[in-house]
Image: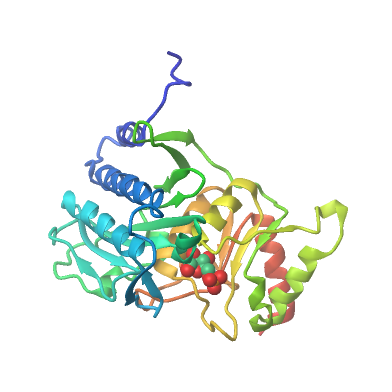
Amino acid sequence: MDRQKELITLEEYIIHAQNKFPGATGELSQLLRDIGLAAKIISREVNKAGITNILGLEGSENVHGENVKKLDLFANEQLISALSRSNITCMVISEENEGLVRLSADAGKYIVFMDPLDGSSNIDVSLSIGSIFSIYMRPEGKHKLTDQDALQPGVKQVAAGYVLYGSSTVLAYTTGLGVRIFTLDPSIGEFILSQRDVKIPDYGNIYSADEGSYNFWDPGLKQYVKYCQQIDADTGRPYKARYVGCMAADVHRTLMQGGIFMYPDSTRYPNGKLRLMYECNPLSFIIEQAGGMAIDGKGRIMEIQPQAIHECTPVYIGSKKNVEKLKEFIDQYDGE
Ligand code: P6P
């Protein structure tokens, strides 16, 4: 069979990619495979959530005071269990847990941040949801780790990615050498390589934001959205407005079709709503690796020095030309 047409599974691809690095220990490969296994189990439950008793609220709240859905907890448990299997991860920081979760592998090489089920308000209405992960090295020579050891800027990520449970289940990841996308074939229970070296269009005609919050926004974003809505054939305006309410889904569409996703700081969310460590940094790593751009309105998301494991940030992410145009409006209307 022609190799080009042969199915390449996530496991095969990871091992093949690792073999290019003679010094590789295989630990990161194993970590990525463990995440892939958890993703298959979560996908199975997501796709039959309406049948089994797994929809609805679990009854508790997460660190952000948001109601926790049963699938949130299931996804969190599956990912923590998968990361505990191979004694490679020393600690996990999850949206679903107040503090850091120390795994048995105290000497484990990696620290994992994750949003186990991003966009969970979409669960009960069968819209897209996702899992997002971000992987850092454990600081050298440190035995007893604290929150501070986990607070590394996004440029220190060794790998990041997301799983999108949508019309199909896709897994995208990067280790800093470009972006790969795999699509789950449920009939064989394997993620199959579907796109090798994904590049985001340099310009797109889709903008994505919760416009219901317009009156909470700063002037720069208000003026930019008006710009998106003006009629101008040369620049493909008016743009289309698309907003799923799940960052992984909105960023995946932006990666595929171009454009911009925005969740700004506002009078409602003075520091933005989306979390730096397990939403914005991993998705910024993916988008930058695909040739796009991700800023907080001033500078690169991935250069922010985090002060707290659950901190939030404004985020404007997508095609380079779209983000640069937005930045012009912010500088013009919101300048110091
Ligand atoms: P809003 C989901 O809760 C999330 O964290 C992101 O996935 C999503 O982009 C955003 O919040 C949606 O926020 O305020 O529109 O419900």
Left or right side of 107 for 231: right
Place residue 221 in its image quadrant: bottom right
**In this rendering, position of residue 86 left or right of residue 189:** left
Can residue 8 be seen here? The reply is: yes
Residue at point 28%, 55% (across, down)? 79
Pick whichever, 309 or 63, lies toward us: 63
Give whichever of 306, 251 is nearer the camera. Answer: 251
Q: How many numbered discs sit on the rendered protein? A: 0
Name the spot of residue 159 as percent of width and height, x first.
37, 52
Relative to 54, 323 lies left or right: right
- Residue 318: image x %, image y %? 60, 57
Locate residue 153, reporting x and y percent.
Answer: 40, 67
229 is higher (above) or lower (below) than 13? below
Residue 109: quadrant of the picture:
bottom left
- For the question of whether residue 301 can be seen, the reply is no
User: Residue shown at 52%/45% (left/top)?
Assistant: 167
Tell me the quadrant of the picture where the C terminus can be found.
Answer: bottom right
Q: Residue at x 35, y 61 (%)?
A: 71
173 up-or-down from 132: above or below = above
Residue 85 locus on image (x, y percent) = 17, 50
- Give the residue at x 73% y 72%: 329
